[in-house]
Amino acid sequence: MKLLVYHIGILAGLDSHGSLRLQGTEMNLFESVPNAWLYVEDGKYVSYGSMADLPAVHYDKVVDAEGGAVLPSWCDPHTHLVYAGSREQEFVDKIRGLSYAEIAKRGGGILNSADLLHALSEEELYRQAMCRMDEIVRKGTGCVEIKSGYGLNTADELKMLRVIRRIKESTPAEVVSTFLGAHAVGREYAGRQADYVEVVVREMIPNVAKEHLADYIDVFCDTGFFTPEETARILEAGAKYGLQPKIHADELASSGGVEVGVKHHALSVDHLESMTEDEIELLKGTATMPTVLPGTSFFLNLPYAKARRMIDRGLGIAVASDYNPGSTPSGDMKFIVSLACIKLRLLPAEAMNAATLNAAYAMGLSKDYGSIRKGKVANFFLTESIPSVDFIPYAYTAPLIRRVFLRGEEIL
Ligand code: NIG
Ligand code: FE
């Protein structure tokens, strides 16, 4: 299948260097060309150029971009989008003054979602999750990571991961899955956290590995959840089955999560709202991508991660939505890019690199996704005609995305 997109006002997110990730000052270049065409064959980018030298070749499909911009699809490297029902009651409780941690302590929060998930059939869970998946695809996401972690016993964790596998098989987007059995201590193990950790290590991880249900392993390493010692034990058990960590660290407090993540060669350490200066130092010179989730800070009124500081200190960062029922029920990556500019003080080019190439890196996918480059998978979207790429985060609620293409095919 030969696809030509022409009359592109701005073709952006090009990648002449072929880097797997961008760090420090490199993040401030979101390469683009004006008045362009883009040629895709069998789902991969082949070439692009200026409208002045459009090649006269036969194409199977021709798309007139009518002056709109073309960008690589968003990559969202941290979500919990497989969940049952919703938790708007806790949203109201938070407005009334309860904190996220207080709600969790009362047995709400993650445990509330675990009860709802337990009561739901695998089929219905798949149906609900697939609606969210379709929603984010329409909003321009082309690669996404999805975590388990609302099962909290072996059977329900496996149920969640099987739903993620079904989503992988049925969506045109690229999906990676992460086992997050250590998201909270399951109700059956209340007051017996050490026993729960043993179940994660001895029962859940071997079963997840046997069915090849996860690409990565995660632990909610934070005050009131799992300690760095418990996290290390779980990550060591995962490593025996080849599961690389992507962990929750420093959301509620500076929790030691960055250190344990770096020590266990985590692909990413995520959240980081309460990260310290020493932890920024720890990340330097490592292959671990700090991934920040400004939607969570926005929704929970938490402090924002020091993303500006990290880039100024030479690190690369990725952004993600954290789409989940408790701390941020939205997977809108365009809004995340706006928050990255407005609240994290990233320049638009930095924010867009954080949501594309660096976000693909944080899922281990940046060799094939995250930028427009010959040989990469043609996941891109087409916008309304816009004056510049900076207009995208600036127009922070405008639905600018007009058409979406994944693997070179238009998604309806
Ligand atoms: O990333 N922090 C832990 N997990 C999720 C929230 C999960 C929930 O509240 O359901 C997060 O914010
Ligand atoms: Fe999360």
Image: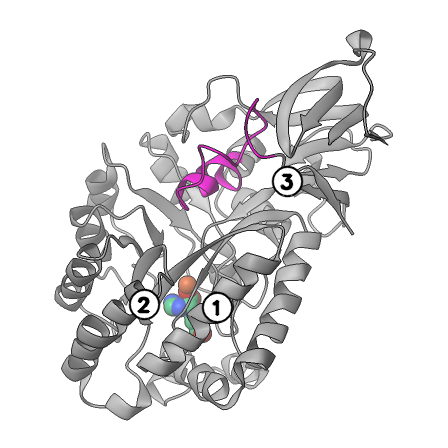
Q: For the residue with label 1, is its CB less than 8 Å from the closest atom of ligand 1? A: yes
Q: Amino acid at mark 3?
A: Arg
Instruction: Please give the residue where the numbered disc 1 appears in the rendered image.
Output: 300
Locate the N terminus by quadrant: top right
In this rendering, the answer to whether 49 lies above or below 232 is above
Q: Residue at x 79, y 11 (%)?
A: 55
Q: Amino acid at mark 2?
A: Val
Give the CA separation, mark 1 to mark 3.
36 Å
| Quadrant of the picture in which ligand 1 is shown | bottom left
Q: For the residue with label 3, is its CB less than 8 Å from the closest atom of ligand 2? A: no
Q: Secondary structure at mark 3?
A: loop
> Which circle, 1 or 2, is nearer the viewer?
2
Q: Give the percent coordinates (x, y) of residue 172.
A: 63, 51
Instruction: Please give the residue where the numbered disc 2 appears in the rendered image.
Output: 208
Q: Secondary structure at mark 2?
A: helix
Q: Which residues are magenta?
A: 353-377
Q: Secondary structure at mark 1?
A: helix
Out of 163 and 97, give the one closest to the viewer. Answer: 163
Q: How many marks?
A: 3
Tell me the number on the disc at residue 388: none
Give the CA separation, mark 1 to mark 2.
32 Å
Decide whether the magenta segment is chiefly helix, strand or loop. Answer: loop
Q: Is residue 369 visible?
A: yes
